[in-house]
Amino acid sequence: MCGITGFYHYATTKPVDPQDVTIERMTAALAHRGPDDTGIYRDKAVALGHRRLSILDTSSAGRQPMTVDDQSCWIAFNGEIYNFRELRDELRACGRDFRTATDTEVILHAYLQWGREAVVRLNGMFAFALWDGKRQLLWLARDPIGIKPLFYSDLHGVFRFGSEIKAILADSQVPRTPDLRALDAFFSFGYVPAPMTGFAHVRQLLPGHSLLVEAGRVRVERYYQFPYPSRPPQETSLDEAVERFGEQLHAAVRRQLVSDVPLGAFLSGGVDSSAIVGAMRRSSASPPQAFCAGFEEDSFDETPYAQQVAQILDVRLHSRRLAPDAAALLPMLVSHAEEPLADNSMLPMFLLSQFARGRVKVALSGDGSDELLAGYMTYKASRLAAYYRTLPGFVRRGLIRPLVESLPASQQKYGASMLARRFVTGAEYSPPRDHCSWRQIFSPEEKKKLYGPKMQSAVADADALGEYAASAAEAPDWLSPLERRLHVDLAFHLPNDMLVKVDRMSMAHGLEVRVPFLDLEMIRTCLSLPPRLKLHKQTGKYILKHWLARELPQRLLHRRKAGFIIPLERWMRGPLLPMLRENLSPGFLDEVGLFANARVDQLIELHASGKRDYAYPLFTLLVFSIWWRIWVSGEMPVQISETGRGRIERTG
């Protein structure tokens, strides 16, 4: 895993001044993603920069930017190609010679052999930029699911790109103007969906897309569609389906165990990570290393479950407990996220990655299973909403909603009052908007109270919820209601939130995280499963739990899904409250000029007093304020992690 960046003066093709150190600044901004090596390539109007995290062929032969043959093509690559050995054999049969054992060189030869069609042959997580000097074109591509990030800016005939936005912003010619429509989406979901970013002049390349800069033009093309069957999946026996599913997961894990450096896994004790670690154990002669982290608050601490799984599966488990004062790291997290991102699980992910990096360089994770196999409680809520809407409107809005609004605030994980309010609000929408609404931080009605005149005017016709729901239009017509909900989360929520969090927080420490559930063959297998094998009655991830039942007891398989989140409700009344008041001061709110200040103050006081639970909305506002100070006004310094930074306490 690495960091890539560069630029191309495509409008004039005027040679860049060799004394210009812009590419050096851009590359240095990504040092945390690739602490092992750095490289820069210049060719008249183009420059490529690379920071290397050495995983395969750790020798100097793997240095990037890399070239082959007559040195007319150069590549800067971030990621891993899991089928690179098969592709290398195929390319050797075509007469191509290799001088390294890297997957980077395979991509270059694949391009030279098959052109831009080579991208459809890659199974992995990746973002790369390839410069073809003979054709004078710059080609960028991002993996089909969006596991690896790729940002770009096209301003005044200069095209810039980077694995992170901070590399692009290292060029002082790129303005830091905030994108208010993107911020509206952020206040809706706690993240900014691609292709938007928080900055008006920086965009994201969508998953499964490539971009070509050639002949004075920039154009984006889609190369990947989710591999649904041509018709609804055929019914099959449970045993047969479980066997096929397990074989494919084993194969995906085996592909992702290829590494020339120490490798481990995250283990929460949930079924996703347990499945990954179990497959690793069966593929390894010795017990693999696994890592978990928990909190002092019992209802948020999953380390006891991880310890039980580790003992059953014969895994070497390393665990830590996270102290509440770790919240002081929030400015550093926002620096690394660089997008407004209010997923509070980025804090434990940051610290867990730091902990794991002390022993391994690569970690496998169970991300993606929820979106493929119906693991979230939102899928059950969407089923229930259909029945709830059969009640008369006066009962729903006149009786049930006022009752729900009167429920006392809770400090428990996924408190009943918070879940009930989200349900009665979202259930008023029709599918699939109802499902998408479960993830709302501020509803449209709440945003009307929150926004000041400037913000209201800028986003008057915005419909963030509609954009989320619109991703269902890409799915086949024959999908069941459940499969349609899974599709919108796989296409929208997963790449814009979950994968962003994992990438930024792990790469802050130079830790590569691999996700076997998002292996392309694994995705194809899951999309071919009948819906009843995903959500059976009220049991999500039904097929995965059946497969794991061979090794794990029922008490572990069917416990309530926990989620890797912090005790936000309590922390927003405790250790984060002073930071909240300081950052959302009247002076700051006046400076930004986007909010109704009285409403912000009201939210703080109602939550601080315990009268209402506004933990998630207030955390979103807190993250925004820190993001603005770091990335827009520049009044706070950018904080980038180094080895040993942050705080972890007590062995679990």
Image (cartoon, rainbow, N blue to C red):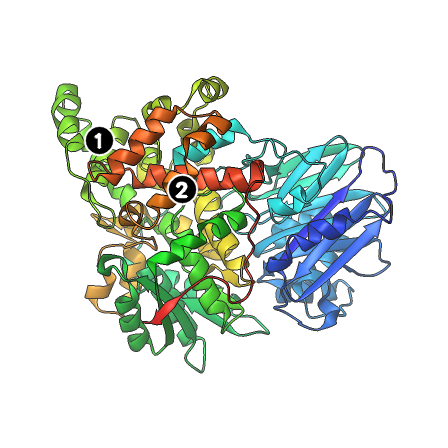
Extreme residue in the bottom direction: 285
632 vs 414, left or right, is: right
Horizontal and vertical percent position of residue 151: 62, 42
List x then y, in percent, for residue 490: 43, 44
- Dot label at residue 584: none
Q: Earlier in the sequence, mark 2 or mark 1?
A: 1
Where is residue 194 shown, x and y percent of the image?
A: 53, 37
Residue 323 in sight: yes
Mark 2 lies on residue? 489
**Rendered location of residue 274, percent (x, y):** 34, 66
Which quarter of the rendering shows the C terminus? Answer: bottom left
At x 22%, y 36%, the residue is: 612
The answer to whether residue 341 is left or right of residue 23 is: left
Tell me which residue sits at (16%, 25%) in the image.
Answer: 396
Of 172 and 517, which appears nearest the observer? 172
Q: State which mark lies toward you, 2 or 1.
A: 1
Q: Which structural element holds mark 2? A: helix
Disc marking residue 424: 1
The N terminus, quarter of image: bottom right
Q: Amino acid at mark 1?
A: Val
Q: Secondary structure at mark 1?
A: helix
Disc 2 residue type?
Asp
Q: Nearer the viewer, residue 154 or 331?
A: 331
Residue 276 against residue 584 in the figure, above or below: below
The residue carrying pointer 2 sits among few (fewer than 14), some (14 to 19) or many (20 or more) residues within 10 Å by Cα, namely: many
